[in-house]
Amino acid sequence: MALIVIKKSPVENISKRMWEITKPGDVIILVQDGIFWAINEKSKEYLKDGVSVYTLKEDLEARGYREEDSIYSCIDYNGWVELIEKNELIIS
Amino acid sequence: MKKVLLVVYQSPGGSIWVNEALRSAFGMYGEDLEPSILLMEDAVVAVNQNTHPENLGCLSLSLSFKYLERYGTPVYVVKEDLESRKVKEEDLEPKWKVNIISKDNLSDFIHSFDRVIFF
């Protein structure tokens, strides 16, 4: 299982590639401009079965959105640290 | 020994990241780390022998060749990204000794490392 950190917005092709490399059991966290995926229904087209997605609340709110705007569950910095501890492979 | 993959996706013309990834890789030989480089998207043009970022005032990619040879750092490029950017096999700079991998194998390939860092 890997934790995949998506930092770039949907307009950047590399962030689409990050979704594509996921495998079942992986976890995605959307941070920085990656949070724009969390307000974009199109992200569901890239989401594979068995992959979990979280949005970093602080980065979402810093860009003017509220937790309820995110399609995916929000976590805070402590939650992010827990994900890092749980996953042996970090792809960032 | 931990296997580390350094991934670059930006073109060497106008960005520093290909050289920075290489510099980071060479620095890892002093640690208990085994680095590899993956070039994807626009970064694949780095392995074209006709690519000369030094013409734009950037660092020359050739600075890294002697270290690539000395350490044998594996360099991987994504086949479909080469094709979409019209880089042909005969264009490849032999000193890179590139390993070409398919986009279909990218997920398994990336998951085979202990750490993956995108530049």
Image (cartoon, rainbow, N blue to C red):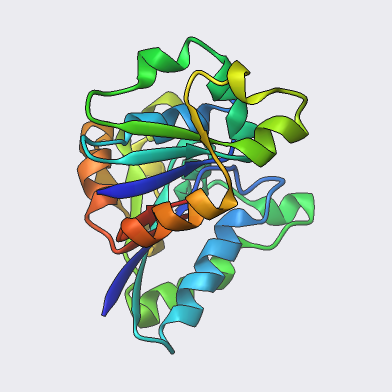
Please identify the residue farthest to the top as the structure is shown: A41
Against B94, is B92 above or below? Answer: above
In front: A47, or A80? A80
Give the residue drawn at x 38%, y 62%: A85
Q: Is residue B106 visible?
A: yes
Give the residue drawn at x 71%, y 57%: B54
**Relative image position of residue B40 (x, y in whole percent):** 43, 41
Q: How many marks?
A: 0
In front: B38, or A75? A75
Give the residue drawn at x 32%, y 55%: B98
Q: Is residue B93 visible?
A: no
Q: Is residue B84 left or right of residue B102?
A: right
Q: Is residue A39 left or right of residue B95?
A: right
Against B54, is B70 above or below? Answer: below
**Relative image position of residue A89 (x, y in whole percent):** 32, 57
Q: Is residue B52 left or right of residue B82?
A: right
**Relative image position of residue B97 (x, y in whole percent):** 32, 60
Q: Is residue A58 left or right of residue A38?
A: right
